[in-house]
Image (cartoon, rainbow, N blue to C red):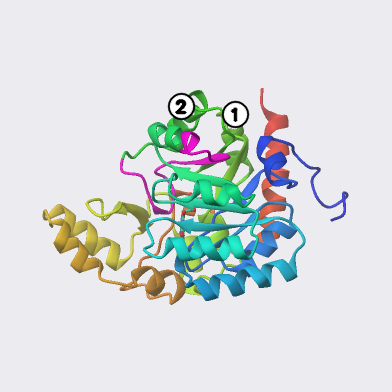
Amino acid sequence: MAESVWPSPVQTRITGLFGIRYPIIQAGMVWAAGSRLAVAVSEAGGLGMIGGGSMKPDLLRAQIRKAKVATANPFAVNIPLARPDAGDLVRVVIEEQVRIVFTSSGHPVRFTGDLKKEGCTVVHVIAAVKHARKAADAGCDAVVAEGFEAGGHNGVDEITTLALVPQVADAVSLPILAAGGIADGRGLAAALALGSDGVQVGTRFAATVESSAHENFKQAVVRAGDGDTVLTLKKLAPVRMIRTPFALKALQAERDGATREELESLLGRGREMMGIFEGNIEEGEFEAGQSSGLVRKILPAGEVVRRMMEEYRAVVQSLP
Ligand SMILES: Cc1cc2nc3c(=O)[nH]c(=O)nc-3n(C[C@H](O)[C@H](O)[C@H](O)COP(=O)(O)O)c2cc1C
């Protein structure tokens, strides 16, 4: 990585914890974050992450092995704890000696001890202060504080990133990654000002060249404006997605007072794959955040990292 082309490193508690050059973490996203995306981000000096949430244990193992061959830089794996076979995915990351694991959507006490015993750095995703405290008590090394602007599954309390991050910073002494609504260097500068030590970015990386999301999905993110995502399925687990025909159907059902069972039946199975991976705009879930409005072009992921750092420098220098 030539110094003349790449912005100089920025050090925070997060870059120190992971051994990376820039405090930019690419979110582990179902159907979008395979080894190709993770490697591109890690090679660019951020932390790439394989999204284990849409992978069977054997596929996750194969993806980890591919990433290890392709980069000597650190990378992470995300394991959503709501998955019934989360324990099998945890076994794979331990056997494959993955050094950094991000857990989400579940109680951090479940696997943090096992992972830490094996020498893993464990980060847990939270959306409220009380959950940050639980992650600290469970022995996690850092937390992702994810606001309700974020694409994909959301917390139930609907706290914005702007309000959540400083409150988490006041409540726990762990390093914090801000997530939700961050897609450029302005967002990174703001997140650091709020008391975070770096950012986890989803939507922006889901619409990059190396993302395994379908072209229809990437184009939908590029087309979307600030108001083109909705938070729906609140009685199940709230999900932020682009205002597609399926999203509108789910919203209408909620307005009509659909019960949990009725929403479950409307959701059915495989909507995330149908939307993000297969690009089915009628029936699929196009999970993306409010930051879609900031995504104007499908770029290589490394270029996203480089631009974010350049913008960050320019923003910090321009502050009064
Ligand atoms: C397409 C997509 C899939 C996602 N899948 C996951 C997932 O499997 N596990 C998880 O913890 N978060 C997931 N998320 C949330 C991200 O990890 C991240 O926290 C979020 O995207 C940050 O907000 P942003 O979209 O505004 O950048 C997903 C987000 C998107 C856009």
Decide whether residue 148 is among the magenta residues. yes
Q: Secondary structure at mark 1?
A: helix
**Residue shown at 55% from the left, 56% from the top:** 204
Residue 293 visible in the snapshot: no
| Disc 1 residue type (three-letter) | Ala
- Which quadrant of the figure contains the C terminus? top right
Q: Compare residues 273 and 298 and report the one nearer the observer.
A: 273
Q: Residue 291 location, x and y as percent?
A: 48, 49
Q: Residue 244 location, x and y as percent?
A: 33, 65
Q: Residue 181 location, x and y as percent?
A: 49, 45
**Relative vertical location of residue 236 with respect to residue 310 in this rendering, above or below:** below
| Disc 2 residue type (three-letter) | Gln
Residue 86 visible in the snapshot: yes
In the drawing, does residue 312 fall left or right of residue 254? right
- Which quadrant of the figure contains the N terminus? bottom right
Q: Nearer the viewer, mark 1 or mark 2?
A: 2
Place residue 309 in its image quadrant. top right
In the drawing, does residue 104 fall left or right of residue 116? left
How many marks do you count on the picture?
A: 2
Q: Which residue lies under the disc numbered 2?
A: 167
Q: Secondary structure at mark 2?
A: helix
Point out the tag, 1 or 2, that comes first from the N-terminus: 2
The residue segment tinted magenta is: 135-156
Q: Which residue lies under the disc numbered 1?
A: 193
